[in-house]
Structure formats: structure tokens, C-alpha cells
Image (spheres, rainbow, N blue to C red):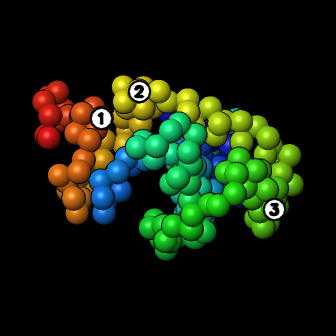
Amino acid sequence: MQHAFVYDEVAILVRHWFEIDLDDSHLEHGARLELRRLVPQERRGTESAAQKIVIDRPLWRADLFDRLDGPPGNFAAAHFHPHFTGPEPSERHYLREDPWEWLQDRLADLPTAGDAADIRADAPEIVEAARRRAATECTSAEQCFAWTRDARQAVHVMLDRLERPDLLDKDHVRPWSSTQSGTSSL
């Protein structure tokens, strides 16, 4: 499930995300927020016709992640991608401050033309949506999978690229690694 805060020029997507570190196979999960630019669409139909909204062109991403090998709320993998090249994020910039305060401050100071005041006004609601998708709110692999089952393909890509698959917690990853028929690829 994703929450979308859609403005005139940008949208902020909020969701829970699950990820496997490609170097040492540790597991990460928590709230993911992406700021994306709306792609202008040609008006269609009558004055009452529903209009197409395309949320694309990622601008930045915040991943307020816990490592699963630490205590809940550890934010040991909380990071920020300050820009994108096409769909690909820049390198991680790890957060060393309280992630919720950082997010509140970041949302209050967005340089997006036209939408900055609206986002600033909605920042408490956006932060609250992210808190509801934080790692501390996801207490089992099954719940995490229920919130991120659409990420199955991404998890398969991660599994194929692991440097140390011998370190992988296969039991925790099993819900994502199952094939369409319900059998496991692990």
C-alpha cells in the first residue's frame, strides 16, 4: 500500500519498503518517501472528464529504515538519496540525526516551485503517514510482506545480486522469494 500526497507540480509517495543489502545480505525495512515530479498530461474529454495523473520523475528519496539484526527503532540504515539520474537513485547519505525531525525539516524546506507552501502545511500529516509505515509498526515477516508484496520483483533482483547469499536470513525472505505458484526459490 502506498499513500500519495499529490500537489500541482509534485507528489510525495509514502510506503513501507523491504530491502536486502547486496554486500552482506542484512535485511532492512521501514518508511520510504519519494518526492516525484508530475508529468504534465494533455487534457482529455469534457469539462467533467476524469484527468490522467502521472506521478514519475523521482527527485529525491528518504529511506527511514531499521536493520532487522538490531532492536526495533534503531534506524541503523536510515538514509537519503538527494537526487536521481533518471529512475536510479544517487548514493546513500546516512542520517545521523532523528529521522522524524530530519523529515519534518526537509519537508518544511523544499525548493519545489509553487508547491512548497502546501507541502510545508501538510508536513505533519506526511510525517504521520510515514510513522504509520515505520519499521516499528511492522512486527513480522508476514506483515512486512503484506505491506510490500508489490516489491517481490525487486526482492528477486536483490537476491540475484547478493555478494554473500550464505549470510541471508532465508526464513525472513521466504514470503518475497516465493514464485507465483507458491513454491520457494530459496
> Given contact means CB atoms under 8 Å apart, are the residues at marks 2 and 3 in contact?
no
Asked whether the beta carbons under mark 3 and mark 1 sit within 8 Å of each other, the answer is no
| Residue at the image point whose x is 77% and y is 62% from the top | 110
Q: Tell me the quarter of the image containing the C terminus.
A: top left
Q: Mark 3 or mark 1: which is in front? A: 1
Q: Is residue 94 above or below residue 158?
A: below
Closer to the N terminus: mark 2 or mark 3? 3
Question: Please, what secondary structure does the residue beneath circle 2 have?
Answer: loop
88 is higher (above) or lower (below) than 155: below
Is 19 above or below relative to 96? above
Q: In this orientation, which residue lies closer to the viewer: 32 or 10?
A: 32
Tag 2 residue = 140
Q: Residue 147 appears at what percent x and percent y?
A: 45, 31
The quadrant in which residue 40 appears is bottom right
Residue hosting label 1: 172
Q: Residues within 10 Å of mark 3 (few under 14, many from 20)?
A: few
Q: Is residue 76 left or right of residue 157?
A: right
Closer to the chain start, of discs 2 and 1, is 2
Give the number of the mark in front: 2 or 3. 2
Under tag 3, what secondary structure? loop
Secondary structure beneath label 1 = helix
| Alpha carbons under labels 3 and 1: distance apart | 38 Å
Tell me the CA gap for discs 2 and 3: 35 Å
Earlier sequence position, callout 3 versus callout 1:
3
Q: Residue at position x 69%, y 57% from top?
A: 97
Circle 2/circle 1 CB separation < 8 Å: no
Q: Which residue is mark 3?
A: 109
Q: Amino acid at mark 2?
A: Ser
Specify whether residue 18 is in view: no
**Residue located 46% across and 43% down the image:** 70
| Left or right: residue 149 compared with residue 104 | left
